[in-house]
Structure formats: C-alpha cells, structure tokens
Amino acid sequence: MTTRPEQTGKKTLHEGVKSAWPICLGYIPIGLAFGVLARKAGLSPFQIGIMSIFVFAGSSQFIAVSMIVEGAGPLAIIATTFMVNLRHLLMSSSLSVFPGKAGKLRLSLFAYGITDESFAINFSKFAKGFWDLDRAIVLNQTANLVWILSTIAGGFGGQFIPEKAFGIDYALIAMFICLLVFQLRGHIYVISAVLSGMLAVFLSIRVPGNSYIVIASMVAAAVGVGVKRKFLIRGKKT
C-alpha cells in the first residue's frame, strides 16, 4: 500500500506543529512581554512585527529595545546583538550534517528559524533518525509565526497597560538572569560571568555610551577561553 503525497504532507505538517507546540507555549508569554516593553520604548505594533520578522531572536530583541531606551547608537546595538547571536554559528554548523542535498530555498527557511529551543528539539530528533528537513522547517516556522504574532499582540496591548504594571518592566532582567544561570555549568563560566559583570560596572563609569557592554563581554570571554586552554594543556601534560 503506497502513501499518497497529500497524506505524507499532512503527516509532516502534523508532526512538525506537534513538536513545535512546547516551544510555542514558552514563546507566547515572552513574546507578549517583549511587545509591551517595545511599545513602551516607542515602537509601533507594525515596527514590532517587522523587527520580529527580520531579527527573530528574543534575547537580541530585548537587548535592542533596552539599548534604544537608553539612547544607544545603531553601531552599539548591532555589535552587541551580533555577539549575543554568535552562538547561532555553532548551532547551524551542528545541524548542517542532517539536511543532505537540499535546495537553497528549503535550507534558507530552515536556517532562518533556528533558535536555542528549535535547535534542541531538531538536533535530538535528527540524531534519533525519526526526522527530516520538511518536518524541521514546519517546526521552525510554526514557532516563528507564534513569536511574531505574540510580539504584535503585546504591542497592541502595551498601550493599555500602565507603566511598570505586572512587573513587565522586569521581564528583560528576569530572562537574562535565567539565561545566565543555565550557562553557569563550571568554574570557568562562573569566573567569566563575574568578571564580565564587575568589568561592565567599572567601565560604565569610565566609558561613555553603551560600548562598555561589548568591551566587558569580549574581555571576559577572552579570559574564559584563555583559562580553559591553560587547564587543558596542564591536563594533557599530567
């Protein structure tokens, strides 16, 4: 018995959406919070939607909005968000072995939707052998659509929410504390985080604008890499 193309398509769509649903449940509240904060920062719902379409990176969008509020220049915003998103190079490289000989359009659609959450699910499913590029694209784009709609909805609702209501102004800080905690998986990561925080506070007094964020991050990352290499070399010698 052969499977009809339309049945295969429906199954692919169903499995992709089903796998994306846990991601969507997390994106909805964060997307709403971002939309509210972006609205408070002066962005219109249309601008919020455009930002979500072309950037599609929660942490970078939160950073950009906070830097816009603080009056940061375009170059500082671009440099900061670029560094935050460098991890996508590693994620996309790890996933590149699975699609095979796919067309540029399908690969572009897949790459566009890669996030921390979609990477984790897609990589796990690809590794188990029960997954393909079409299902992965459906998963990514479903999560993408939910994120975009959530941020726009937050933008429309933001005009009716009083300033600092519901602790929404704390959403950015809370999200980055959560992201930081998940990264503290060893002494080197703790050292890098503490050094980055202390250096950022010191440089914020000495350096004008928001460039101190980029400088502190780069210095702390370099120190972390140096310390890690030193320990690896010592381990090989012993």
Image: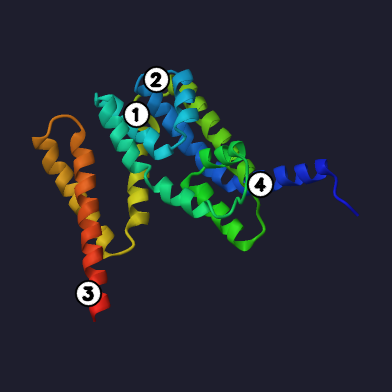
Q: Which mark is residue 113?
A: none
Single out the mark in the foreground, 1 or 4: 4
> Counting residues from the N terminus, which is met first, the one under dot 1 or under dot 4?
1
Marks 1 and 4, how far apart at CA: 33 Å
Single out the mark in the foreground, 4 or 3: 3
Q: Residue at x 21, y 60 (%)?
A: 226
Give the labeled residue for mark 2.
43
Marks 1 and 2, how far apart at CA: 9 Å
Q: Residues within 10 Å of mark 1 (few under 14, many from 20)?
A: many
Q: Position of residue 167 (x, y in %)?
A: 36, 35
Most extreme residue toward the right is 1
Circle 4 SS class: helix
Q: Residue at x 50, y 48 (%)?
A: 117
The type of residue carrying mark 3 is: Arg
Q: Which mark is residue 234?
A: 3
Q: Residues within 10 Å of mark 4 (few under 14, many from 20)?
A: many
The type of residue carrying mark 4 is: Arg
Marks 4 and 3, how far apart at CA: 45 Å
Q: Is residue 147 above or below residue 180?
A: above
